[in-house]
Image (tube, helix red, strand yellow):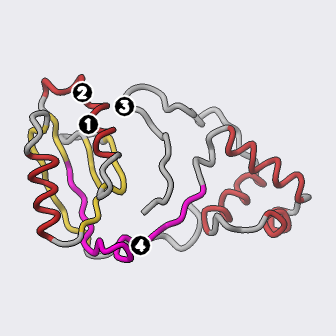
Amino acid sequence: MVAESSTQGTSRGARPNDVRAVRLDEIDHVLLAQLTRDARTPNNALADLAGIAPSTCLARVRALVEKGVIRGFHADIDPAALGRDLEAMISVRLRADARPHMAQFAERMSATPEVLDVYFIAGADDYLLHVAMRDTGALRDFVLDHLSARPEVAATETILIFEHIRPRSGR
């Protein structure tokens, strides 16, 4: 679970910080790989790893943040520690006549505490929600009360997550 909110992505067009044109060199890749592994790496250690001066390292990391390459520094909290032992992915298909309200749907879901991530996807469905719940009863209630009961929702499909396995190294 991410401990801070972010303003990444929009429902249409280019992302607010469109990073496709940003050129990254080898040093940027070293910095990003290490920060992906451990966002709390001290600047001096990061500079040593990249073979640059600490002041240069700090300036580079700040530039990566300003350009939108680094979207934030997060605490990755285990939902089970918050009493949410059950995780699931829920695909949501909106009704065809609800297309003008897609952004509002995404914002509403993003503001829901049980929703960890909202993905706007291609295919038969429109959204994929990663949720963490107390138990199956809470999951059922969420699907019935927050999704199926909404007039813009045409269909949902819930997939339980047995285990969330993360890559060990930077991506």
Q: CA distance from mark 3 to mark 2?
A: 10 Å
Contact between marks 3 and 1 (CB within 8 A): the answer is no
**Does the segment drawn in magenta span residue 96?**
no
* Residue at the disc numbered 3: 11
- Contact check, label 3 and label 4, Cβ < 8 Å: no
Residue 64 position, x and y percent, is 70, 45
The residue where tag 2 is placed is 101
- In this rendering, the count of numbered labels is 4
Q: Residues within 10 Å of mark 1 (few under 14, many from 20)?
A: many
The residue at which mark 4 appears reads as 78
Q: Which mark is residue 105?
A: 1
Q: Position of residue 102 (x, y in %)?
A: 26, 31
- Residue 88 is left or right of residue 2, and the answer is left
Instruction: Identify which amino acid the numbered label 3 is placed on.
Output: Ser
Relative to residue 64, is residue 151 drawn left or right?
A: left
Range of magenta residues: 73-91
Mark toward the viewer: 3 or 2: 2
Local secondary structure at mark 2: helix
Distance in Å between CA atoms under marks 3 and 4: 28 Å
- Label 4, label 1: how far apart the Cα atoms are: 26 Å
Q: Mark 3 or mark 1: name the one nearer the start of the chain.
A: 3
